[in-house]
Image: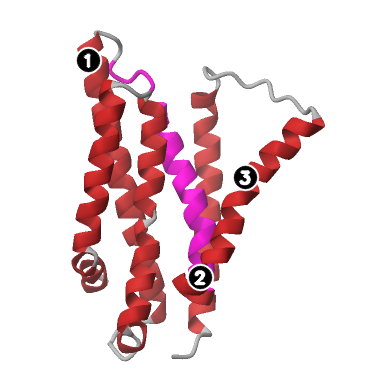
């Protein structure tokens, strides 16, 4: 398993450096201009996109055929993708959290003020991964582009439908932190279910 994860980082090292440069730019904007909570959500979400690049690289290089003759199980191969995604997500979330704490100290306010944004970003990223990873295992990166676009459109369509229907949600910004623990537990359960589905999909694939 350790070798599989190491391969992910070595294969994508140039892409990771590019992503890191983009994230540093947005963190810079958050620290000196834009609202940091929005930057954190974008950054964590953006970091999880690395797993799509991973699938794309493997399809082009033929790695999927090669790795299945190595002494690793298909369950380990699937788990590697989830762990790689989680490492990227946690790294981006932790970095944003530290910047937020540093900004708060500089302003003379509570160090953990608005730190809930890092947790919210991680939850959003996990929801994204829960849906996207089974799709990637089923059809691959190239064939899933249209499906992913449709998946991205669903939240916007739901929001538009709610707005047009006149449904109101009375949740203030101050209430959001208290909702994070329940949302986090639900997201973890969904992520575990997603992992089980991905394992079953990958076990049935032929290479």
- For residue 55, above or below residue 14: below
Circles 1 and 2, Cβ within 8 Å, touching? The answer is no
* Image mark for residue 155: 3
Q: Could you give the CA–CA distance between mark 3 and mark 1, rounded to whole angstroms?
A: 35 Å
Q: Quarter of the image containing the N terminus?
A: bottom left
Residue 205: in magenta span: no
Look at the image and say whether residue 128 sits in the magenta stretch: yes
Query: CB atoms at circles 3 and 1 under 8 Å apart?
Result: no
Q: Could you give the CA–CA distance between mark 1 and mark 2, rounded to whole angstroms?
A: 43 Å
Q: Main secondary structure of the magenta part?
A: helix
Going from N to C along the chain, the mark reached first, 2 or 3, is: 3
The mark nearer the N terminus, 1 or 2, is 1
Circle 3 residues within 10 Å: few <14, some 14–19, many ≥20: few
Disc 3, SS: helix
**Percent position (x, y) of residue 118?**
38, 34
Residue 198 is situated, as x and y percent measured from the top left of the image, at 51, 70
Tell me if mark 2 has few (under 14), some (14-19) or many (20+) residues whose alpha carbon lies within 10 angstroms of its own: many
Q: Which residues are magenta?
A: 111-138
Q: Position of residue 111 (x, y in %)?
A: 28, 17
Specify the quadrant of the image occupied by residue 76.
Answer: bottom left
Quadrant assignment for the C terminus = bottom left
Residue 59 is left or right of residue 18, and the answer is right
Of residues 65 and 78, the one nearer the viewer is 65
Identify the residue at horizontal 24%, vertical 56% (top origin): 16
Which label sits on residue 198? 2
């Amino acid at each position: 398993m350790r070798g599989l994860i190491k391969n992910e980082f070595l294969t994508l090292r140039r892409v990771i450096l590019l992503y890191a440069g983009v994230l540093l730019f947005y963190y810079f904007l958050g620290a000196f201009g834009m609202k940091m909570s929005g930057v954190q959500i974008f950054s964590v979400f953006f970091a999880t996109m690395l797993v799509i690049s991973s699938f794309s690289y493997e399809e082009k290089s033929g790695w999927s055929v090669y790795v299945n003759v190595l002494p690793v199980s298909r369950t380990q191969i699937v788990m590697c993708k989830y762990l790689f995604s989680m490492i990227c997500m946690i790294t981006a979330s932790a970095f944003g959290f530290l910047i937020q704490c540093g900004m708060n100290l500089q302003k003379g306010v509570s160090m953990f003020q608005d730190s809930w944004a890092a947790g919210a970003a991680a939850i959003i990223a996990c929801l994204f991964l829960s849906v996207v990873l089974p799709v990637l295992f089923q059809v691959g990166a190239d064939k899933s582009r249209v499906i992913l676009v449709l998946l991205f459109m669903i939240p916007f369509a739901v929001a538009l439908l709610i707005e047009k229907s006149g449904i109101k949600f009375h949740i203030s910004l101050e209430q959001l932190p208290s909702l994070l623990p329940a949302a986090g537990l639900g997201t973890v359960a969904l992520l575990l279910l997603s992992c089980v589905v991905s394992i079953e999909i990958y076990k049935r694939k032929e290479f």
